[in-house]
């Protein structure tokens, strides 16, 4: 125990300790952190921060026991050996990375976000304390909170959802829906921060099993090509995809509308499902999320590359509505232009 404590102290206090990880963390950042990791060699790795920091910690933990290059493990179940033990401590609410069996690293040369998916990637321990989020700035609270809400909504309507994941996801929607505005506007509201952290955790537990959908399939190329922060990419694309999906699973979207506080009395099933879309649009507006992608430099010239990369994602297959490349192109155009198709 003393030896472990000493090594952890060295890891934290050494000047070689990595203290900053960029959004959409790159292969180069992983390699830099892995270089810092190797001497002295710790018994345990701690990922403290937002989703990017935890994803880098996961990647380093994989390299610590498997060696090679992090891109060797892109895809499903490529990790051969159990990683170095990992403790994940989220400081945002959030990505849910502390409870998921995946890490996403950006390959800047290929302009893609690589997903490394394996049960061997999941942290052994997650320490979740909402007090760590009390000082997060409003814009980061908004974007990470909408990331968590996207996880919950996509998990709830996923083709691979099961009753257990739907229960987790729907409660996450309730918690986030009632508290995200307060968390953004009044950052020191402890109750709101509690709700957001629990909502993020539950959503992460849900989508770790159910997978996600078109929003994440589209968001990853936006991060890989245009470096759009993941939370903003999800938040902006979410209402357009919900509008596309709503009538394929109207009962589920009606549940979402109610979980977000919507009154469906007197509405048809179709109207109640579409109310969920309106509530998310309103939520985005209230917390300062843009209605389109233009402010992030996303342009229509990149549509072919965006669509090609999105269609590779396994999340397309579990989206509740069958989706073609033509559909994805239309959804990107809507999100770039800020206009909805009927």
Image (tube, rainbow, N blue to C red):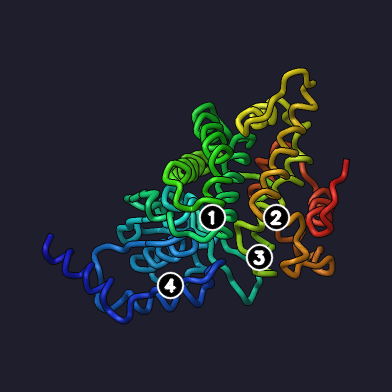
Residue contact at pointers 2 and 4, CB within 8 angstroms: no
Provide residue 229's location: percent of width, then percent of height.
Answer: 61, 63
Q: Secondary structure at mark 2?
A: helix
Q: Residue furthest right?
A: 342
Q: Is residue 312 visible?
A: no
First in sequence: mark 1 or mark 2?
Answer: 1
| 2 or 4: tag closer to the N-terminus | 4
Mark-to-mark CA distance, 1 and 4: 36 Å
Position of 7 compared to 38: left or right? left
Q: Give the side of residue 176 with respect to residue 325, left or right.
A: left
Q: Which residue is mark 3?
A: 228
Distance of label 1 from label 2 (alpha carbons): 22 Å
Q: Specify which label sits upstream in the sequence, 1 or 3.
A: 1
Label 1 close to label 3 by CB (< 8 Å)? no
The residue tagged 2 is 218
Q: Nearer the viewer, mark 3 or mark 2?
A: 3
Which mark is in front, 4 or 3? 3
Residue occupied by mark 4: 68
- Determine whether label 3 and label 2 are within 8 Å by CB: no
Question: What's the distance in space between the residues labelled 2 and 4, CA to CA?
Answer: 29 Å
Residue 47 appears in which quarter of the rendering? bottom left
- Residue that label 1 marks: 141
Residue farthest along the top direction in this orientation: 266
Q: Position of residue 206 (x, y in %)?
A: 51, 39
Residue 179 picture location, percent across and down: 53, 41
């Amino acid at each position: 125990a003393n030896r472990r404590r000493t090594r952890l102290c060295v890891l934290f206090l050494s000047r070689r300790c990595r203290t900053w990880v960029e959004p959409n963390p790159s292969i180069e950042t992983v390699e830099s952190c892995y270089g810092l990791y190797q001497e002295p060699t710790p018994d345990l790795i701690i990922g403290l921060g937002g989703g990017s920091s935890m994803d880098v910690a996961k990647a380093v933990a994989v390299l610590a026991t498997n060696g090679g290059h992090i891109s060797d493990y892109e895809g499903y179940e490529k990790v051969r050996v159990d990683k170095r033990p990992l403790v994940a401590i989220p400081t945002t609410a959030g990505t849910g990375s502390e409870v998921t069996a995946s890490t996403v690293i950006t390959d800047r040369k290929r302009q893609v976000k690589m997903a490394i998916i394996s049960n061997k990637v999941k942290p052994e321990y997650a320490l979740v304390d909402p007090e760590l989020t009390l000082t997060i700035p409003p814009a980061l609270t908004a974007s990470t909170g909408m990331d968590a809400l996207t996880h919950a909504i996509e998990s709830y309507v996923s083709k691979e959802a099961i009753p257990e994941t739907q229960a987790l996801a729907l409660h996450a929607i309730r918690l986030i829906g009632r508290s995200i505005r307060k968390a953004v506007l009044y950052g020191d509201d402890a109750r709101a921060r509690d709700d957001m952290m629990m909502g993020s955790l539950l959503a992460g537990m849900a989508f770790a099993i159910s997978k996600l959908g078109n929003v994440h399939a589209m968001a990853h190329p936006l991060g890989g090509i245009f470096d759009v922060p993941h939370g903003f990419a999800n938040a902006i694309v979410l209402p357009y995809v919900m509008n596309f999906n709503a009538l394929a699973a109207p009962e589920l979207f009606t549940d979402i509308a109610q979980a977000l506080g919507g009154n469906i009395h007197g509405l048809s099933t179709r109207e109640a499902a579409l109310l969920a879309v309106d509530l998310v649009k309103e939520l985005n507006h209230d917390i300062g999320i843009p209605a389109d992608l233009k402010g992030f430099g996303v342009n229509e010239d990149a549509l072919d590359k965006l669509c090609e990369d999105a269609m590779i994602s396994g999340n397309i297959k579990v989206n509740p509505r069958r989706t073609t490349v033509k559909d994805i192109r239309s959804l990107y155009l809507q999100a770039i232009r800020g206009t909805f198709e009927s």
